[in-house]
Image: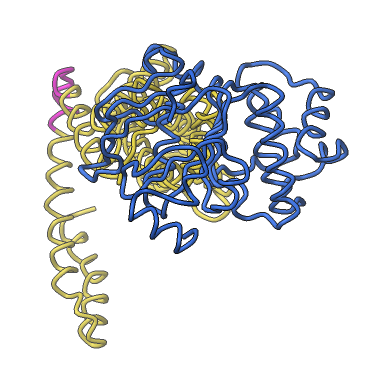
Chain colours: A yellow, B blue
Amino acid sequence: MTYLTLSITLIFVVIPLVLSKTLNLGLERDTIIATVRSIIQLLLVGFILKFVFDSESLLYIFLMVTLMIVAATHNARNKGASIKGITWKVAVTLIFVEVLTQGILIGLDITPPTAQYIISISGMVIGNSMVLSILFLNRFTAEVESHQDETELVLSLGGTPKQAIHTQLINSIKASMIPTIESQKTVGLVQLPGMMSGQIIAGADPIQAVQFQLLIMFLLLTTASVTSVMLGFLSYPTLFNQRMQLIQKS
Amino acid sequence: MTTDYKPAIHFNHVDYSIDGNKILRGITGSFPEGKITTLVGPSGAGKTTLLKLCNGLLSPESGEIYIKDKGIDSFEPVELRRKVGIALQSAPMVSGTVYKNLALPVELRGEKYDKKEAESLLRDVGLDEKFLDRKVTDLSGGQQQKVSIARTLVNKPEILLLDEITSSLDRTSLKEVEELITLINRKYGTTIIWITHNLQQALDIGDYTWVMMDGEVIETGESELLRSPANDRVKSFVQGGAQ
């Protein structure tokens, strides 16, 4: 696609601008800011990726993945602000998921250890792991708050913190994983995944695009389960003190 | 009040607060072993907090608590909570059958609860053994309360803490629970500490009474003190009836 062709696609920005103006939605300024930001951010990422891909330097790949993990951690931690040490818990989870998935892919020679594959797949893995972390933390903090009596009951009968929080933990893990599993059930029927569509538009063989898409989907299943379980088991002990008491908040 | 008896639990200048809000101030006193002590006082006096301190669900901000002359911190939390059982007013039922609820304390130890034992315990609390396989949601409030007490008794606690367990019961169920608690106390020598808003119940059942207000113990003594309190605030509370 040429820059001229790309500039013509701005017609898709003009339509919402006209609608906003006509209907007094007041969204013109935000629409323009969003458009300008997306152009700058994506072009910047495009140039950086081109540079990193061309250089094939391990250091640049490492820096790119690190940047993704830092940004994802920053975004997800706000949802678990009430959990002590949530920043490092999210960071450790994201790093573990990244190392595990890339370790399997590269270790078993499923994908080549090149910047093109590592960075693209890392982006999907870390992004998905971040969303899963947010879903899990949202649900877990709500479950803990609304089921304090149940937690206290188990503690009062001589249960350990792990036994006391077990139901809430399992419910939160399941709830955060459901969207990933459900979306995979309807994939191809309701919508074509973005990555697959992109490959097909770029001229790739649809069967090969599907193969890659399947790889990514299986990968995301692992990402979803490992993220929720790991973050859950790292988070729950901070809700209790050394005397196995639920930490009180007024 | 406790000089004639060995204390089961002793508080020594205990304070407790949450985020700077003082809930209990300078609590000092003993609960006699093998006796029934009632805790009375208006809502928000800190009675439930005091019970939770007794079985280690909470720890004091300052001061000491002794369980039979041993500092409370010298007990492992799990051991302490089995020794000092608590039936809280807010304690929920586990969804499922009555057996599932009674088996919970045993399953937490990784063991299986014998059905015969469960049936015997049910009879002890005045429920027919056929209730064992019933869903807790099919039980009345009074029956659920009895199951809650029975669940606490599964651990065979030496000290039993009860938080307004009869507040939602009808007259017949209330009498049955009172008789049950008295029986447990007399038969097994279990020390009972019982929060109640029912002053007549405190007089009928309790050997001793603590009157609490605004996080402090105002007056303690034999339950008869409720008939003629020495303290003016307690007098006014008693005359006003239970709040």
Residue B104, position in %: x, y? 65, 28
Asked whether residue A153 is in view, the answer is no
> Splitting the image into 4 quarters, where does residue B105 fall?
top right
In the depicted structure, whether residue B199 falls above or below residue B103: below
Q: Which residues are magenta?
A: A51-60
Farthest right residue? B130
Q: Quadrant of the N terminus of chain B?
A: top left
Is A12 within the magenta?
no
Residue A213, position in %: x, y? 47, 37
Residue at 12%, 31% in the rendered image = A51
Number of marks drawn = 0
Q: Report the front residue among B94 and B41.
A: B41
> Splitting the image into 4 quarters, where does residue A226 fall?
top left
Q: Report the front residue among A67 and B119.
A: B119
Residue at 70%, 27% in the rendered image = B103
In the depicted structure, whether residue A59 falls above or below residue A53: above
Q: Report the front residue among A23 and A208.
A: A23
Asked whether residue A60 is in view, the answer is yes
Residue at 82%, 25% in the rendered image = B115
The secondary structure that most of the magenta stretch takes on is helix
Q: Is residue A153 left or right of residue B215?
A: right
Residue A232, position in %: x, y? 42, 30
Residue at 26%, 30% in the rendered image = B61
Residue B181, position in %: x, y? 67, 36
Q: Is residue B66 left or right of residue A165?
A: left
